[in-house]
């Protein structure tokens, strides 16, 4: 008796990978709402925690901007963050971040626009990478206030050193919006997709018969 064997072809999503590099060394690090730069790190991530409440607030402002940046990038499509690299002069909470790099993996890259204008009006957006660069710049040029759990070195013991404080994070630069854009580099890794166009299979079932 003949036996028919069917092979089902499963298609993988055409995911797209972008690398992001932000040169934060030129951003403000004064003990104001504009200081703190941007970083996913919190006070407990450092070997030596911030030594003053003002320095701890800078760390929290940087973390709040990271959150704002992630929200801005997720407006059009879901994504995953990978390969985060933070560069500090020392593993201390009082040490400002100088460079931030990470990867973005989009499952639905076609939802990311390719047209628009940068926040300073200087450049026309023509690619997805430029659009993502602009969304990051928007987040870093925005002001937001949130209640956050802050490490307070003036407290005694633990958890007494953790306080809920209203934190305001303002633009990382106040003189030139264009310099925020110029500090951000977004690059699409074109060879990352699991299936390129010439690798996509034809949707045919293979039938095999045998006695």
Image (cartoon, rainbow, N blue to C red):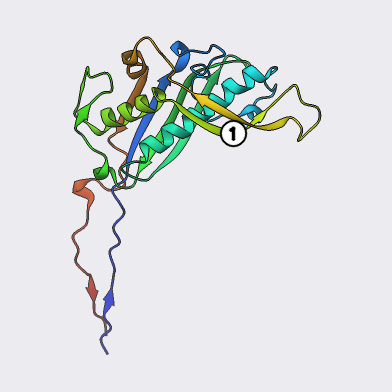
Q: In which quarter of the image is the N terminus?
A: bottom left
> Residue 114's spot in the image, x, y percent?
21, 34
> Residue 7's spot in the image, x, y percent?
29, 69
Q: Which of 168 and 97 is in front in this view?
A: 168
Residue 92 visible to the viewer? no
Q: Taking 105 as reference, is 7 left or right? A: left
Instruction: Check disc 1 and report its element: helix, strand or loop.
Output: strand
Residue that protrudes farthest toward the right in the picture: 157
Residue at the (51%, 16%) spot, across then down? 35
Residue at the (26%, 27%) spot, across then down? 130
Q: Quadrant of residue 167?
A: top right
Q: In which quarter of the image is residue 116?
A: top left
> Residue 174's spot in the image, x, y percent?
40, 12
Q: Which of 68 and 166 is in front in this view?
A: 166
Residue count near mark 1 (Cα–Cα under 10 Å), binned few <14, some 14–19, many ≥20: some
Q: Taking 171 as reference, is 10 left or right? A: left
Q: In this view, does 16 lie above or below 166?
A: below
Q: Quadrant of residue 204?
A: bottom left
> Residue 63's spot in the image, x, y percent?
53, 29
């Amino acid at each position: 008796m003949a036996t028919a064997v069917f092979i089902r072809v499963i298609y993988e999503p055409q995911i797209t990978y972008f690398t992001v590099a932000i040169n934060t060394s030129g951003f403000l690090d004064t003990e104001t709402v504009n200081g703190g730069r941007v970083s996913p790190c919190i006070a407990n991530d450092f070997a030596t925690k911030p030594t003053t409440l003002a320095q701890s607030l800078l760390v929290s402002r940087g973390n709040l901007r990271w959150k704002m940046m992630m929200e801005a990038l997720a407006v059009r499509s879901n994504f995953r963050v990978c390969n985060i690299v933070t560069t500090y002069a020392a593993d201390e909470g009082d040490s400002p971040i100088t460079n931030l790099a990470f990867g973005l993996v989009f499952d639905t890259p076609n939802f990311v626009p390719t047209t628009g204008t940068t926040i300073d009006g200087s450049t026309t957006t023509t690619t997805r990478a430029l659009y993502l660069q602009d969304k990051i710049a928007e987040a870093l040029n925005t002001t937001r206030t949130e209640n956050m759990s802050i490490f307070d070195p003036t407290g005694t013991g633990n958890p007494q050193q953790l306080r809920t404080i209203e934190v305001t994070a303002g633009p990382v630069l106040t003189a030139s919006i264009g310099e925020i854009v110029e500090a951000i580099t977004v690059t699409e890794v074109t060879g990352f997709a699991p299936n390129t166009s010439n690798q996509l299979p034809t949707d045919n079932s293979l039938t095999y018969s045998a006695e």
